[in-house]
Amino acid sequence: MSDAVTLIDDDLHRQLALRWLSPRADDAHKGDFGPLLVVGGGEGYSGAALLAAETALRAGAGATLVACGRTAAAGLWLHRPELMARAVSSRADLQPLLAMARVVVAGPGLGRDDWARELWPALAAPGPRQVLDADGLFWLAENPERHPARVLTPHPGEAARLLHCHVADISRDRPAAARELQSEYGGVVILKGAGTLVCDGERVWRCTAGNPGMATPGMGDVLAGLAGALLAQGVPLFEAAALAVSLHARAGDRVAVHKGQRGMLASDLWGPMPALLNPTQQVVEQ
């Protein structure tokens, strides 16, 4: 395997966008791009599930459901009525939603309590394509298992937990850490940070876009929802991960240009997304 790291430069971004973000068929319907299911939003963490799920909708997912705690469900219904929030308390409640989902985004606001512990075995079982983020990565580290159709989205601290090492070990050689994570857990790995890496075991791509203003709560939830939305629209695993990272970073850069870096919110990325997600042959966001 080559040790080379390929940059996600403007030309590669353009190729991915033109290939996978082409105009939709006139007879498309919401079932063509879903259902997408977000599992998270435990007690006190409804915001994370909302950021992931609303991002998925804004990024082109079709029917979008959220399996969450009872308190979170009420808040989601009020804030974003386009989402189908379902309160779940057990694996039995969750299983029918998993059975109907094309893609699952698991972890935003999942928590580490008994509720999450009850749901985790259903999320770990073989099933639809999955984006695993946040507390989902905590439970994976506690119960290691490979999954060929999963996108993992760890930051360096979560990567260190998954590899049973120190954050300094991750930072010392990020491409090697991304490869090791992929070898251990399968699927595609998005190793977040300055110069986010995307690795499928054969390729390691590095994104050069993005800025320090994006070091703020909720950015990972937005990225997870974006990756899930692209998967729900039929983009292959590695391409969905790479394109999500690139779009996410470019949206952050556009916000920084217009509003500045300091004080950026994760939900601010929703503003630039329509232009980024709807390129044409003549005009592609760079």
Image (tube, rainbow, N blue to C red):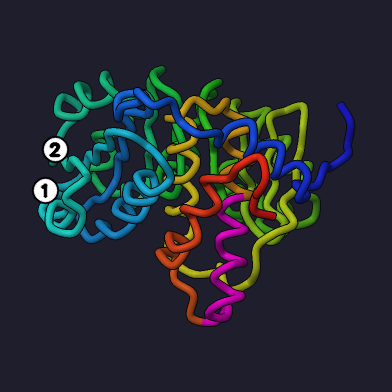
Q: Quadrant of the C terminus?
A: bottom right
Task: Count the marks.
Answer: 2
Task: Examine the image and state in which quarter residue 36 appears.
Answer: top left
* Callout 2 amino acid: Ser
* Callout 1 amino acid: Arg
Q: Residue at x 62, y 58 (%)?
A: 250
Whole-number angstrom distance, CA of label 1 to CA of label 2 = 8 Å
Task: Examine the image and state in which quarter residue 139 appears.
Answer: top left
Task: Examine the image and state in which quarter residue 232 appears.
Answer: top left
Q: Is residue 13 magenta?
A: no
State the SS at label 1. helix
> Does residue 146 lie above or below 252 as drawn?
above
Q: Marks 2 and 1: in contact by CB < 8 Å? A: yes
Q: Residue at x 54, y 28 (%)?
A: 235
Per the picture, the main secondary structure of the magenta-coloured stretch is: helix
Left/right placement of residue 55 relative to residue 158 reads: left
Q: Is residue 255 magenta?
A: yes
Q: Which mark is residue 89?
A: 2
Please say whether residue 88 is visible from this viewpoint. yes
The residue at which mark 1 appears reads as: 70
Q: Position of residue 41 (x, y in %)?
A: 26, 50
Crowd tier of the residue under label 1, counting other residues whose Cα lies within 10 Å: few below 14, some 14–19, many 20 or above: some
Range shown magenta: 247-262
Q: Quadrant of the N terminus?
A: top right
Crowd tier of the residue under label 2, counting other residues whose Cα lies within 10 Å: few below 14, some 14–19, many 20 or above: some
Observer-nearest of 103 and 168? 103
